[in-house]
Amino acid sequence: MIVYATINRCVNNKIALPASPRLSTGDSRSDEAFPNLSPGHPQRWNILWILCGSLVLVVVSVSSLNVAIPAVQRGLGATATELQWIIDSYAVVFAGALLPAGALGDRFGRRGALMWGLAVFGIAAAAGMLADTPTQLIASRSAMGLGAALIMPATLSIVATVFGPEERGKAIAIWAGFAGAGGVVGLLSSGVLLERFWWGSVFAVNIPIVVLLSAAVLWLVPTSKDPDATPFDPAGAVLSMLGLGGLVFGVIEGAEKGWTSPESFGGFGLGLLALTAFVVWELRSDHPLLDPRFFANRDFSVGCFTITVAFFGIFGMFFVTTQFLQFVQGYDPLATGLRILPYALVLLVVAPLAARAADRHGARIVIASGAFVGAAGFAWLALLEVGSSSWTLAGGLATVAIGTGLLMPPATTALVASLPPAKAGVGSAMNDTTREVGGALGIAVVGALLKVGYSDSLGTATDALDAEARHIADDSIGGLLAVAAQLPPAQAEPLVAAGRVAFVDGQALGLGVAAALLFTTAVVVLAALPGGHR
């Protein structure tokens, strides 16, 4: 990447931009392609905080509605399927639209994409606040996903263009820290709002934030785009949306209805067919949306793989630990958010330090070290017991935060900096896509493993119940607690105790697999990325 001022200078003087520099793996030639570069935009740090605020707005909306689901169900009378799609419609549209949205920012201007994204997001949030049927809320969440897809890649691509090479890694590290911490902010903010207000408050709070951010963007944020005005690739955009949207849909439906269900099978089939067609089309296109040949670049492919696995673990961790705190240890949503807060605080401290470490020791060592530490953190959390203290939980969360805080910034820099500057939006969108796909897989796979471990451990504890109650209790810890609430204490207490132990056993299975995957990722990074020092 090169800074915004340099792009303008190159365009005005008709100087060819350097292609695909290596800025992230410790290659000593990293900056030789950029002699005498400007340090960046004079307001770059103020711009960074505006962009991080826009980023957090998007990430918060991924997690904030999870703790509001009971209130939404009471307020709108939504069925279980409708509740699922109130949550998942955002993720499906968001993941599917990211690559086309990033390409639109490259072609027509990244600040414009950010402004349009904020506008769509704010209007959709207002519609969600006023929704009085589940269908209306699903539609508004889908529109919020579209706005988010315009916002998120624009924030990272603008960061990459307003900072010079000496500070770009640090800026991306701060961006990555806020991207990782935003999920916890969503849980905590929703808990605070739901203590005092109705479920619509989790949508209403977005409106003044969007207005303030839009004004700040217009005031300070410069625009940038592909200086060659590369034509947009509508066929590639449609195929990528169908492919990624179908893949995420298949993952979500597989976790809910089974991996061989028609919905899951159809989603995977559509996704794989569309992605295959996308690759064939892009290889033949004169102006591809995302050139598949980029994956031959180890920085790009290893960056994608590492971020996918990291967010697989992070989203899976949030999915099970929020249930552990509420169903097993009995905390309310606000107390749950407070107990997960150590993850966000540690991540925000560690992520900026990772950029310095990568400059000194090379990204290969830092990414691999982060993956090893993160794997240890997931293994720590897999050992939680029913009566584990909040300090024990905090220690595991902090260890995961140290690991992911170390690996995310250099992996993000590796991915984004491996592409030509004109493709900053597409590179940013690819980074965001790996996060979304990894997160969806994490929730689905860790959730499925949780269910397997829970059912196996529960064993015959529910045999005394009637068929309907047994089916509900065997399905989830939440269902078991609802059944137990209708039973006399002598029968309810041993059932609840067995259910809590079974949940912890399932949690151990899911997080143990996440730990193994991240450990494997560390080995892959050491083998695939070149060594060296910057």
Image (cartoon, rainbow, N blue to C red):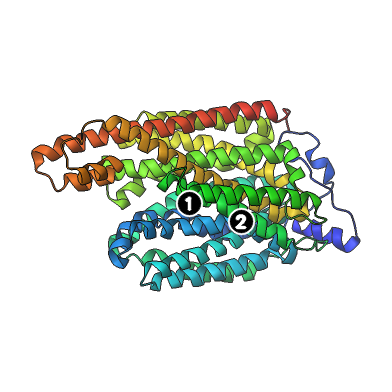
The C terminus lies in quadrant: top right
At a point 41% along the width and 29% down the height, the residue shown is 380
Q: Which is more toward the observer, 289 or 393?
A: 289
- Above or below, 454 relative to 331: above
Element under disc 2: helix
* Pick the front one: 66 or 169: 66
The amino acid on which the numbered mark 1 sits, given as a three-letter code, is: Glu
Q: Horizontal and vertical percent for residue 416?
A: 69, 47
In the image, residue 232 lies at what x, y percent? Answer: 75, 63
Residue 178 in view here: no
- Graded by Cα atoms within 10 Å as few (under 14), some (14 to 19) or many (20 or more), the crowding at tag 2 reads many
Measuring 65% from the left and 40% from the top, which residue is drawn there?
303
Residue density around tag 1, few if under 14, some if 14–19, many if 20 or more, within 10 Å: some
Q: Would you identify the image quadrant in which residue 298 lies? A: top right
**Nearest to N terminus: mark 1 or mark 2:** 2
Q: Which numbered dot is residue 242?
A: 2
**The label number, if any, that marks residue 458 in the structure image:** none
Quick one: SS at disc 1? helix
Q: Position of residue 375 (x, y in %)?
A: 50, 30
Q: Please give left or right for residue 149 compared with residue 32 in the image.
A: left
**What residue type is disc 2 on?**
Leu
How far separated are the C-alphas under marks 1 and 2? 15 Å
Q: Which mark is residue 263?
A: 1
- Coordinates of residue 503 in the picture (x, y in percent): 31, 36
- The nearer-to-camera label among 1 and 2 is 1
Q: Is 451 placed above or below 179 here?
A: above
Of the pair 207 and 37, the residue shown nearer to us: 207
Residue at 54% x, 51% y is 267
- Which residue reaches farthest right? 14
